[in-house]
Image (cartoon, helix red, strand yellow):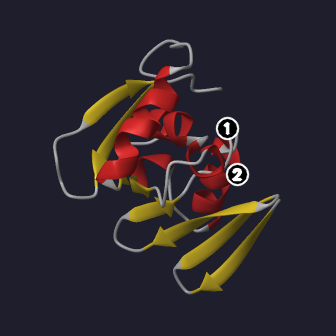
Amino acid sequence: MGIERVTHDVYRIGMGYVSAYLIVQHEVSVIDTGLPKHREIILKTASQAGRKPDEVKHILLTHHHADHTGSLAELMGATSAKGYIHPLDAAIVRREAGAGTELGNPGRADCRPADGAPHAEARADRGA
């Protein structure tokens, strides 16, 4: 696993065969979350960029595969971020997240479809 600064405000977070990206501007955004249990490397990247977990406001998911959504619930539980995904993938992500066991509060992934429709809740194992 490795962290690479791509541009002034974009970081690539290598997680084996997948990557996530951190965009550090006025608000911090994450693109994809990798497999489960990768929350810490994403938060470490934010810290290296001089930002705190509560400054992560947006998590954008490119599609529903687990290697892109696996750490969504754990990252949302550690930040104040909202999740965003294409409407056709939202139900799949909610269903996958709902397959886990709820641990404490919230262990919940609220994903807003990219079309701006209301949040749809899913319960997920934060894997913390």
Q: Which quarter of the rendering shows the C terminus?
A: top right
Q: Which quarter of the rendering shows the N terminus?
A: bottom right
Which of these two is toward me, 22 or 66?
66
Residue 81 in sight: no
The residue beneath circle 1 is 36
SS label for mark 1: loop
Q: Which residue corresponds to the image point at 56% horizontal and 19% vertical from the top-left?
A: 100
Which of these two is toward me, 42 or 86?
86
Residue 31 in sight: yes
The residue beneath circle 2 is 41
Q: Which residue corresponds to the image point at 64% horizontal and 61% vertical from the top-left?
A: 45
The type of residue carrying mark 1 is: Pro
| Extreme residue toward the bottom, this view | 7
SS label for mark 2: helix
- What is the distance, in whole Å, between disc 1 and disc 2 at their CAs? 11 Å
Q: Which residue corresponds to the image point at 40% horizontal and 74% vertical from the top-left?
A: 25
Give the number of the disc on residue 92.
Answer: none
Rendering quarter of residue 44: bottom right
Rendering quarter of residue 79: top left
Residue 33 x/y as whole percent = 58, 51
Query: Is the residue 100 above or below the residue 18 in the image?
Result: above
| Extreme residue toward the front, this view | 88
Residue 87 x/y as whole percent = 30, 51
Residue 105 x/y as whole percent = 43, 16
Please tell me whether mark 1 or mark 2 is closer to you in this view.
1
66 displayed left or right of 97? right
Circles 1 and 2: CB atoms closer than 8 Å? no
103 displayed left or right of 76? right
Q: Which residue corresponds to the image point at 61% horizontal and 58% vertical from the top-left?
A: 47
- Disc with the residue nearer the chain's start (1 vs 2): 1
The type of residue carrying mark 2 is: Ile
